[in-house]
Every structure is written in C-alpha cells, then in structure tokens.
Image: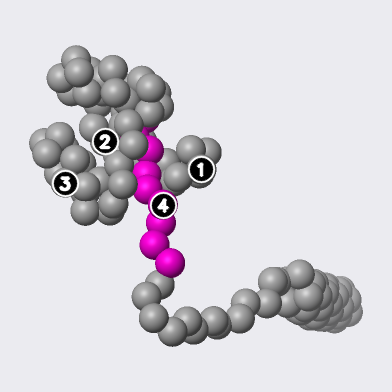
Amino acid sequence: MKTKYVIGFFCILLFAVLLLTAGYQLSYRHVMDRQAARAEETAPTTESISAEGEAVQEEGYYLSELQGYVVVYLSDQTTIYEFTEIPVLDLPEEVQQELASGKYVETAEELYGFLENYSS
C-alpha cells in the first residue's frame, strides 16, 4: 500500500512540474510578443529618398586627438566618424600641433590618404 502512495506522490509532483513549465513557457511567449509589439511601435519609420543628380557630399572632416590616438570627426566637430589606432606620439611634431588645433581635411580621399600615410 505504501508504494501506491509513493507512486501517486511522484505522479502528482511530475504533473505539477509540467504545469509550471507550461505556465512559464506561455508567460515567456507573452512577454516576448509584447516586447516585439512595443519595439514595432517605437521603431522610427524610414523613407527612401532618391535624388536626381549627384548626392550631397560631406563638408569635410576634422582630425583630432582623443586619449592619445587620432580620431576623425565629421564637419560638425562633435560627431565621431572613425576611431583610428594611430598613436599621436608616433606622428611628427608638426602634425601633432595640427591635430591639437583640429586638422581640417576637405575630402574623403585626402582623409584616407592621411590615414594611410601614418597608419603603419
């Protein structure tokens, strides 16, 4: 008689674990669906705009020093365009002084020419 109670107890325990697992899965799916819906609501809509003629070109770049390395900023001098691995101390003194005041580079070709010259 005692083994019947033990078997019954384990069956009830197994059933409870299955119910808890199913409840967890349902609540997890519900939360993930809500998060996805919230993300869709807050995601900005983007529109594709095509222009005739040439595209608008950036107005230039500024090279400066940040934590001992050369950093490229966009023309607004606050938005970082690219981090480099070029140590400022490895550059000639003249270039270091230009970087201290913010060296202006007009085109992307000039920018990548400068970076290529001093990167190795």
> What segment is highlighted magenta in the picture?
56-65
Task: Label 2: state its secondary structure.
Answer: strand
**Which residue bears the numbered disc 1?**
76
Rounded to the nearest angstrom, the CA distance separating label 3 from label 1 is 21 Å
State the image quarter where residue 13 is shown. bottom right
The three-letter amino acid code for the residue at tag 4 is: Glu
Q: Nearer the viewer, residue 86 or 112?
A: 112
Does the stretch in magenta take in 61?
A: yes
Point out the tag, 1 or 2, that comes first from the N-terminus: 1
Question: Residue 23: horizontal and vertical position, in percent?
Answer: 83, 77
**How was the colour assigned to the protein in this rendering?**
one colour
Q: Is residue 64 magenta?
A: yes
**Percent position of residue 4, x then y:** 85, 81
For badge 1, the amino acid type reads Asp
Give the distance between the C-alpha atoms of the residues marked 4 and 3, in whole angstroms.
17 Å
Work out whether residue 36 can be spotted: no
Residue bearing mark 2: 85
